[in-house]
Amino acid sequence: MSDSQTDRTGPRTLFEKVWSEHIVREDAGAPAVLYVDLHLVHEVTSPQAFDGLRARGLKFRRTDRTVATMDHSTPTLPRRLAVVDPQAAAQLAKLKANCAEFGVTLYDLDSAEQGIVHVIGPELGVTQPGCTIVCGDSHTSTHGAFGALAFGIGTSEVEHVMATQCLLQSRPKTLEVRVDGKLPAGVGAKDIILAVIAKIGTGGATGHVIEYRGTAIEALGMEERMTVCNMSIEAGARAGMIAPDETTFEWLEGRRFAPKGDAWTAAVAKWKTLKTDPGAKFDASVSLDANTLAPMITYGTNPGMGIPVTGNLPAAGTGETASDRAALAKALDYMGLTAGAPIAGQRVDVVFIGSCTNSRMGDLRSAASVFKGRKVAPNVRVLVVPGSKAVKRQAEAEGLDVVFKDAGAEWRESGCSMCIAMNGDQLSPGQYAVSTSNRNFEGRQGRGGRTLLASPLTAAAAAVTGKVTDPRTLMGGAT
Amino acid sequence: MKIEAKDPFTTLAATFVVLPADNVDTDQIIPARFLKVTDKKGLGDSVFADWRRLPDGSVNTDFPLNRPDAKGAQILVAGQNFGCGSSREHAPWALVGWGLRAIIAPSFADIFKGNAMKNGLLPIAVDAAFHARILEARRADPAARIAVDLPAQTVALEGQPPVRFEIDPFAKECLVHGIDELGYLLERSADIDRYEAKHA
Ligand code: SF4
């Protein structure tokens, strides 16, 4: 073990502070017993865990620390037309019955709070600085934007948390990702994280918790910080964190489950201590210059295969090892793209604006700024899917739905939708999609579908031009 | 309460299949459309569904798991960062459902690795040289076998000297003795009570 891991009195990182606060017990030769402050639950990864509790006759330890919603297999068609897939319907019914039986709060399809689990946690104020948060979902890393230690777990662990409110966890290492400087216009949080993953690779942060730091990170709003932390898992990280500051407190104050009155004052005082101390050591560190970033887009079948939208695909045979070269060839074959060719101008069939990465108000406003006064290109289908019902209401209050619909885009109900293609929203084989989601794996958005990941701005630019386009050429309104 | 012991994992000797691609993600191991199940069973038929079948629905006879010599294989030899992406435990359920007991790769994604071990599926990280030797042995003889000895932490091409692999000692204990982590956690209830009282 390195000094940074054993020396609990010296300068500590944000991660170390939150981690050590939550150790229930630590025995030699065994992982730590880590306490979980908040457990988020959704329909896909929970039924087998509830069954496990029942089969073993176990009690649900802390329903008051558990929040459930439906998001993955829910329809996003207007007015929630029937769940056509009987298996999905059964899964939703099962979550409802399980939550009723065990007494877990559920924001189901009919509730005003429903939405993607990683969108509603922060919205409701249950996501708070310094907390440990888990969910049977790898994008739980999103909540790290608040200075929480938040990570995805498997269904066995979902059951562990239900029964004990604890998890057995070996201590991860720490990785500092520094982004300093000022982002150019038209470049945002999604471009930062795509650039980070392109730099370190999809396994680059395996075994580590990332802390994003630096002036460019501090300048981000909360929604943008969530976008960055969201995709930590795409770099292989266990979690991603950003130290809480005035931006965080301002965003949280007054939210439904945020502390109130004196409790709020006390909480903020405590949260202010959640910073990496000067001199604290990370196990590894990488840095990026925000000034030089451009809008990013992926061309391949993992999120590390990203380039600036103004760039060219790697030349044939690029790659350090034989297996890198094979991976590139296989990815380009699946994507139907040519090595060395520019990515700009690539034909687009579908544009998806949504997912826990980019479905919040800022994302929708930024996409709408491109759609305003323009039309979706012929033969392009555009889905705009708000992350939660609250986002949907706010967007409609601001008239964004009208902007999208006038342009020719579909304005949907909240949910995961085409991010995971479980609910009928999916690509056909061979189609190209520019998507604001987080995964471009083969078939992720429908079998044979080809996904290019990008920011809401870049996605909207593709929607109105019908091809991959540098969004900066469309900024400043329709001409 | 009743915590059932799982099948212990000690030694294994079996033929193997090779899927050398890097960064095989859990969406490939089990595509999302199969996640609508509410139990753990029956996913073996859908493992690598989109690679095992061609777009027209016919069987892709070229895919390693579909070849006749894959029959009875209990070990998968994969590329680096195997199991990246989604945290779905359906991935190990599907691999185990197909008949696999161990995966050998240069590296694994974190969540997948934890999920696998909780389901009696042993992830074995090996160095590039040994990985290359395995691939070579399989090319020379599709009936080549690999022997795993978990208590000794060794893996070998049958008939050749074993090499050591690393595994978290606690995870090893759980696998070798068929211990369920939940039982271990439940035994710490008094500590959890104390923690909650202090942090209420
Ligand atoms: S939006 Fe996509 S990545 Fe996010 S929770 Fe839903 S399926 Fe997972």
Image (cartoon, rainbow, N blue to C red):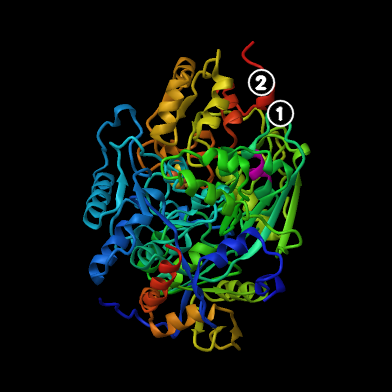
Which residue in the structure is indicated by mark 1?
A185
Quarter occupied by the N terminus of chain A: bottom right
Say if the magenta span includes residue A193.
yes
Quarter occupied by the C terminus of chain A: top right
Q: Is residue A78 above or below residue A356?
A: above
Asked which quadrant contains residue B46, the reply is bottom left
Subunit under mark 2: A
Which residue in the structure is indicated by mark 2?
A475
Contact flag, marks 2 and 1 (Cβ < 8 Å): yes
Asked which quadrant contains residue A226, the reply is top right
Q: Indicate which label's residue lies in the foreground, 2 or 1.
A: 1
What residue is rendered at 25% in x and 48% in y?
A: A96
Along the line of sight, the residue nearer the viewer: A266 or A365? A266
Task: Name which residue type carries label 1.
Answer: Ala
Q: Is residue A254 left or right of residue A193?
A: left
Local crowd size for mark 2, using a 10 Å CA cut-off: few (<14), some (14–19), many (≥20): some
Task: Name which residue type carries label 2.
Answer: Met
Specify the segment rendered in magenta.
A191-195
Element at label 1: loop
Secondary structure mostly seen in the magenta stretch: helix
Specify the quarter for ligand 1. Answer: top left
Subunit under mark 1: A
Element at label 2: loop
Residue A242 place in picture, x, y as percent:
62, 50
Local crowd size for mark 1, using a 10 Å CA cut-off: few (<14), some (14–19), many (≥20): few
